Each structure stands twice: as structure tokens, then as C-alpha cells.
Amino acid sequence: MKKILQYLFEYKALDREKAREVLLNISKGMYNEHEITAFMTAYLMRTVTIPELQGFRDALLELCVPADLNSNKLIDIVGTGGDGKNTFNISTLACFIVAGAGHKVAKHGNYGATSVSGASNVMEQLGYKLSNNIDKLRRELEEANFCFMHAPLFHPALKIVAPIRKNLGIRTFFNILGPLVNPAKPAYQLVGVYNLEMARIYNYMLQQTGQRFTIIHALDGYDEISLTGDTKLITNEGEAVLTPEQLGKRMVAPGDIFGGNTPEEAAKIFLSVLKGDGSWAQNAVVLANAAMGLNNTGEYKNYEEAFQEAVVSLESGKAYRAFEKLISIQ
């Protein structure tokens, strides 16, 4: 590791194979926590390159627990995290709205490293038992249209670096990797990123997969459609910038989408929104992200039709019933 660190500190980049090798070695426990921390810190001083990211992804996918969920139409809605905004769990809520609309969701997530409550935190808080048992996940998908895949249970390297990421408390390249390594290999993916450079990198990476994707970045820094400002949109077909009014009928204030100060508060907000008792702003943001996820499937005439489908899922209680069913079979 010493030679690798010296190489990186000279502002040089690893090639794809070397990046793969380093992450394989991390997963094998070949480096101590100080060496891994130094390695991660090197990437705080510059953007990870595409070959490095490809190598890291190669290693994670090579080592990951396989997850054949008997479906070729899975959807994931996921953000990189690390935007420092501490919003409530918008993408996870959006996934339940998509599930309520009748689509199969394989949500990939983790504990919050830079926020109070990541997707895994809120799911555990609400009674979900994290597991990599494929039979359990298939049953959840069959009965609730939703299963949750806790990243460290599927990726050994992520389990090793989890405490280091938590102690650092800042964004690292592992934030970038998460959405690229869903072991279920969803056919449709809505990915939120925290800056435009990441949007460019993701566009390149996802174009190689052949899957339908939509990349979103709120231009005021959120890794999701926040409705606090305009949103940059990148799909297989091209790019656009859309206003809050186009996406969610009106603009909201940053304080309207605050995620709480504890995991307990985050879970309370989550349930309130899912039950249909959220504020107008909370509902609008969740519906916009769910609608974009639905629209990404290509099964709707346009975004507006997908938005109306999301409204029906939330307001009819279908989204909440999908959640109730999921928790009942834990």
C-alpha cells in the first residue's frame, strides 16, 4: 500500500486493473485501517477517474454475493449520498410509491455515512430485518413488490470500510460506487448525484451497461429532485434542465425537506409521508422522484402520466400497504 499511496500523492491515477487489485486486497483484509483511510483520503483531493471507478466496480461485482431475484424488470432509485443536505429518506420513500404502483423494486442501500439516517438506518428502525437470503428477498419482491439489499451484506469490501467511512463522516469514492454495484442488476435505474462532474462520470459508466437510466442532480447541490431549484436530467437519450414547477408543481424551501436530527425522527417523518400525512412539500418531492423512476421504465406516455400514477399510489394507500406487507413477512 505504501507504494500505491506514494503514487497517488504524486497526483497520478491508477489504471483499471490496479484499481481492481487494490479493492480486492482491501476486501481480503490485507491493509490496516490507517492505510485504507489514507487511500480514501487521496480521493478527497481529486475526482476519481473513470478507469479507477471501473476497476473498483469490477472488484466489488467480482466479490459480491449473487442475487438472482427471478425478475428482469427490477427498478432501483438511489442517490450517491454525500451531498451534506440531510434530507429525509426521499429515494426510499419513492421506491415504495413505485412498488405501490405495481412495479418490482430492488432497493440497494447502506447506513448513512454523512447523514443522520441512511436507507438501511430507516429500514431497520421501521422493523425490516437486513438480510442477503435470496429466498427471503424473492418472497418480499413477490408479495410486496419491494426488497431491500443492504450493501455490506453483499459486498465484503464495503463491510470492511464501513466503520472507517462512519468515522470520517465525509463523502468518499464509496458513495460513488454504491449505485453502480446493485447485485440484483436492475433493468431500470434512477441515480441521484451530488455534482455535475459525477453526472458526467455516471453517464459514461451507465451508457456501457445497456440498461435504461436517468441521472438527476439538483443544481443547488442535492443528489435527488429536491424542488428547491432546477434539476439537471441525463438519460440514455439526452440531457435537459427542468424546473420545480415542471417536476413537482411548485418550488419548496430547503427546510421543508429536512430529515430530522436522529434515526428515530427520520423514521417518524418516513412513516408520516408514507401514510399520506406528509406536508405538501414532502409529498411533492417524493412524488417527483417516484414519477421520474416510473417514467424511466418507458411504460408511460410521458412524465406527467407517471406523476399521476405516483399520486394514485400514495393517496390510495397502495404505497403504504406495500410497506405494511413487507414488514409483516420479516
Image: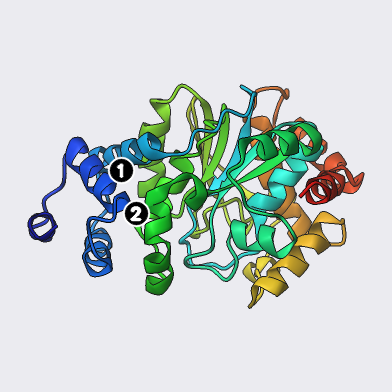
Q: Amino acid at mark 1?
A: Phe
Left or right, 84 with reference to 287:
left
Residue for point 53% across, 64% down? 112
Where does the N terminus fall, quadrant-wise? bottom left
**Residue 227 coordinates in the image, percent (x, y):** 64, 55
Determine whether label 2 and label 1 are within 8 Å by CB.
yes
Left or right, 224 with reference to 203:
right
Residue for point 52% across, 58% down? 222
- How many numbered badges does the structure rendering display? 2
Query: In 3D space, how far apart are the residues under numbered discs 2 and 1 (Cα atoms)?
Result: 9 Å
First along the sequence among labels 2 and 1: 1
Q: Is residue 282 above or below residue 286?
A: below
Q: Is residue 308 above or below residue 220?
A: above
Q: Extreme right residue here?
A: 316
How packed mark 2 is, by other alpha carbons closer than 10 Å (few <14, some 14-19, many 20 or more), is: some
Which label belongs to residue 56? Answer: 1
Q: Amino acid at mark 2?
A: Phe
Q: Could you tell me which secondary element the residue under label 2 belongs to?
A: helix
Q: Which residue is mark 2?
A: 173
